[in-house]
Amino acid sequence: MSKVKYYYDKESLSYRKIERKKRTTFKYATIFILAAAFFAFIFVFIASQYVESPKERALKRELQNAQLQFELLNKKMEHAEAVLENIADRDNNIYRVYFEANPIPDEQRRAGFGGINRYKNLEGFDNSKLIIESNKRLDILQKQIVVQSKSLDEIKILAEEKEKLLEAIPAIQPVSNENLTRMASGYGMRSDPFTKVRKMHWGMDFTAPRGTPVYASGDGVVERADSNSSGYGKHIRINHGYGYTSLYAHLYKYNVRKNQKVKRGDLIGFVGSTGRSEAPHLHYEIFKDGDRINPINFYYGSLTAEEFNKLLEHASLENQSLD
Ligand SMILES: [Zn+2]
């Protein structure tokens, strides 16, 4: 309750109530409210600098969580980078070497992005550095994956080529030779069965009864199946591609025609003794780029190491060829 104030009126010689004018009251009230509002504002402003509102606290927690998640993502990227590096390493040192492709240089695998600043729109925020670094890292990782993927595509093609090559080149013995007893004479200097003079024997002889099946030693096309070469009698030449040709001589009968496609292991003819031959046997030669080479090195397709050694021993015996 506000105090009632009085004053002494000389004219009436009495105390009279002081009546404040309403306007004045309103003015004081307004000033008071404005001042109060002003101080309240200052107080709230200062307080807000030091005290967090619940909303601010929530936002701050959210931001902290986002930063934590970014750090976790970076850890995951680190792991992915390590895995990819390991794959790239194997790619360069095993796969590409095996298929005779040049390794992909590190600079090419790790190439960044020159020129324009791709991360300009991410600049100017408190977390810009974290976000830009993470983006850059992921972009590089992505590019490395593309390089790696292309490399594997290339290797796939090379592997398919290699598979064709492996199927094409002569790799088995041309007659069934389970006990490895059929080899009569190997490649090298041997005495001629007719003249008894030592001369070069350009192939391998396998003794076998007339009519024994003869098999193609690799995939290819029959280039010749005739007896128009002196000495060989009825013979077959298979062109395997990649510079390889195999020759099967002194046949009794053909099972293929010229220009026919054959697969490794196909029956192409039968052992005989046609041409310059002393007894039924198969004379077998391999050509690489037109030169005759030792067939002993081309039986890996069907022999164990032990069997190969036995065959090698047999083939190197200095004996008489059957031609
Ligand atoms: Zn021979």
Image: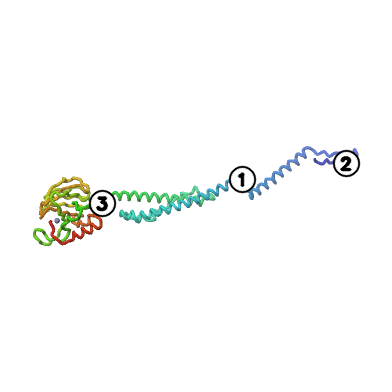
The answer, for residue 203, to whether it is visible in the render is no
**Element at badge 2?**
strand
Looking at the image, do the residues carrying marks 2 and 3 touch, with CB atoms under 8 Å apart?
no
Looking at the image, do the residues carrying marks 1 and 3 touch, with CB atoms under 8 Å apart?
no
The residue type indicated by label 2 comes to Tyr
- Position of residue 7 in the picture relative to residue 318 (left or right): right
Which residue, given by chain and number where applicable, does mark 2 sit on?
A: 8
The residue type indicated by label 3 comes to Leu
Q: Position of residue 244 (x, y in %)?
A: 21, 52
Where 8 falls versus 294 (above or below)?
Answer: above
* Nearer to me, 319 or 250: 319
Neighbor class of circle 3 (other Cα within 10 Å; few <14, some 14-19, many 20+) is some
Q: Earlier in the sequence, mark 1 or mark 2?
A: 2
**Element at badge 1?**
helix
Q: Position of residue 303 (x, y in %)?
A: 24, 54
- Position of residue 8 in the picture relative to residue 58 (left or right): right
The residue type indicated by label 1 comes to Pro
Neighbor class of circle 2 (other Cα within 10 Å; few <14, some 14-19, many 20+) is few
Which residue, given by chain and number where applicable, does mark 3 sit on?
A: 166
